[in-house]
Image (cartoon, rainbow, N blue to C red):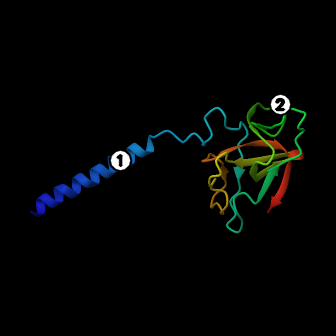
Amino acid sequence: MQADMGGLMHIRISNMLIMASAVMIVPTSSSAQEPGRRPQVPIVIEADLDFDACGANGIIEGLDPGGDGFLAVRGGPGSKYAEIDRLFSGEQVYLCAEKGKWLGVVYSKRRRDCNVSTPWISTQPYTGPCRSGWVHRNWVRLWAG
């Protein structure tokens, strides 16, 4: 009887390992940043156990309604970098980095947790689950942080 239980436990553990492996190869959700749409210059999150990974929140505003109506998210801190996404008035972003007049932002079109509202224990580039990129600071208003 105990040999059968041992075999059953082995099968259950094997099945859990198979299921865990299957979960790891499932493609990321559509709200994660697609390969090729990640910034060329990554948003580096600084480790500091006393502060959230991204210390402030902003909202997109002041876009010209008679203009193109969007704020280009760029692959790096400058207009020479490719546009990788677009943000519109009223959208919220986490402000995570700064280079001159450019802000490194993390954001989600689906209002999901981006894993930047708590401290990080090591400095590293942001890789998801949300999108990231660089925007010009002229159209981002600080609203918390």
Q: Quadrant of residue 116?
A: bottom right
SS of the residue under disc 2: loop
Residue drawn where x is 54% and y is 42% of the image: 29
Q: Is residue 46 above or below residue 51?
A: above
Specify few, some or many for label 2: CA neighbours under 10 Å numbering under 14, 14-19, or 20 or more.
Answer: few
Position of residue 55 relative to residue 106, above or below, is below
Q: Amino acid at mark 2?
A: Lys
Residues under labels 2 and 1: Cα distance?
45 Å
Question: For residue 80, which numbered disc appears in the image?
Answer: 2
According to the picture, the residue beneath numbered tag 1 turns out to be 19
Q: Which residue is depicted at the point 42% across and 45% down? A: 23
Q: Quadrant of residue 101?
A: top right
- Label 1 element class: helix
Q: Nearer the viewer, residue 80 or 27?
A: 27
Residue situated furthest front in the rendering: 66
- The furthest residue to the left: 1
Amino acid on which the number 1 mark rests in the picture: Met
Q: Is residue 100 visible?
A: no
Q: Which of the two discs, 2 and 1, sits closer to the camera?
A: 1
Residue 55 horizontal side relative to residue 121, left or right: right
| Image x and y of residue 41, in percent | 73, 39
